[in-house]
Image: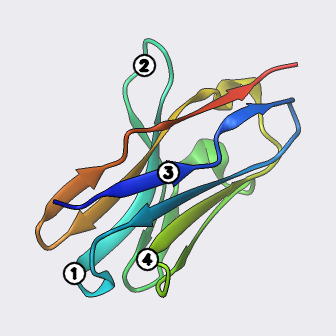
């Protein structure tokens, strides 16, 4: 069973920045991708950003140019730098890891963008 530990959520004003981090217990050699999803109240969970083993990335249109996903293979961690945050970015953000042994989720971290 893969364990994912998320950190970095909180309350931020519109236009501000936050950095989310997720540490994985999975071997980097068995990890196909690491990513972030979010779920706002009353909404379905949606992809925010993903980084593949190749280093390729994919972003939701709503966050392109504002969010950056990165990883540190040595720390088996993935990060999401979020800039120019908007109230509509408010959601619970979930770390996701897709490995050769399955698909795993973190417990989520709340990001609230409000003045």
**Mark 1 surroundings within 10 Å by alpha-carbon count, few (fewer than 14), some (14 through 19), many (20 or more):** few
Mark 1–mark 4 CB contact (< 8 Å): no
Q: Earlier in the sequence, mark 4 or mark 3?
A: 3
Residue 14: quarter of image:
top right
In the rendered image, the vertical position of residue 110 relative to residue 52, given as above or below:
above
Q: Which residue is drawn at 83% across and 44% down?
A: 84
In the rendered image, the vertical position of residue 71 relative to residue 54, given as above or below:
above
Q: Earlier in the sequence, mark 3 or mark 1?
A: 3
**Mark 4 surroundings within 10 Å by alpha-carbon count, few (fewer than 14), some (14 through 19), many (20 or more):** some
In the rendered image, the vertical position of residue 68 relative to residue 13, given as above or below:
below
Residue 23: quarter of image:
bottom left
Q: In which quarter of the image is the C terminus?
A: top right
Give me the C-alpha separation between circle 4 and circle 2: 30 Å
Give me the C-alpha separation between circle 2 and circle 3: 21 Å
> Which label lies toward us, 3 or 1?
3
Q: Earlier in the sequence, mark 2 or mark 3?
A: 3
Residue matched to label 3: 6
Q: Which residue is drawn at 81% across and 47% down?
A: 17
**Residue nearest the viewer, comparing 84 with 62:** 84
Residue matched to label 4: 76
Secondary structure of the residue carrying tag 3 is strand
Give me the C-alpha separation between circle 3 and circle 1: 20 Å
Q: In which quarter of the image is the N terminus?
A: bottom left
Residue matched to label 1: 30
**Mark 2 surroundings within 10 Å by alpha-carbon count, few (fewer than 14), some (14 through 19), many (20 or more):** few
77 sits left or right of 65 in the view: left
Q: Which of marks 1 and 4 is nearer the N terminus?
A: 1
Mark 4–mark 2 CB contact (< 8 Å): no
In the rendered image, the vertical position of residue 103 relative to residue 44, given as above or below:
below
Residue matched to label 2: 43
């Amino acid at each position: 069973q893969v364990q994912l530990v998320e950190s970095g959520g909180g309350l931020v004003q519109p236009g501000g920045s936050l950095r989310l981090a997720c540490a994985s217990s999975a071997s980097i050699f068995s990890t196909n991708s690491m990513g972030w999803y979010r779920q706002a109240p009353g909404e379905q969970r949606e992809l925010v950003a993903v980084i593949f083993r190749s280093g390729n990335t994919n972003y939701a249109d709503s966050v392109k140019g504002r969010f950056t996903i990165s990883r540190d293979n040595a720390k088996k961690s993935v990060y999401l730098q979020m800039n120019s945050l908007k109230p509509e970015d408010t959601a619970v953000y979930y770390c996701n890891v897709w490995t050769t042994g399955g698909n795993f989720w973190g417990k989520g971290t709340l990001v609230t963008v409000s003045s």
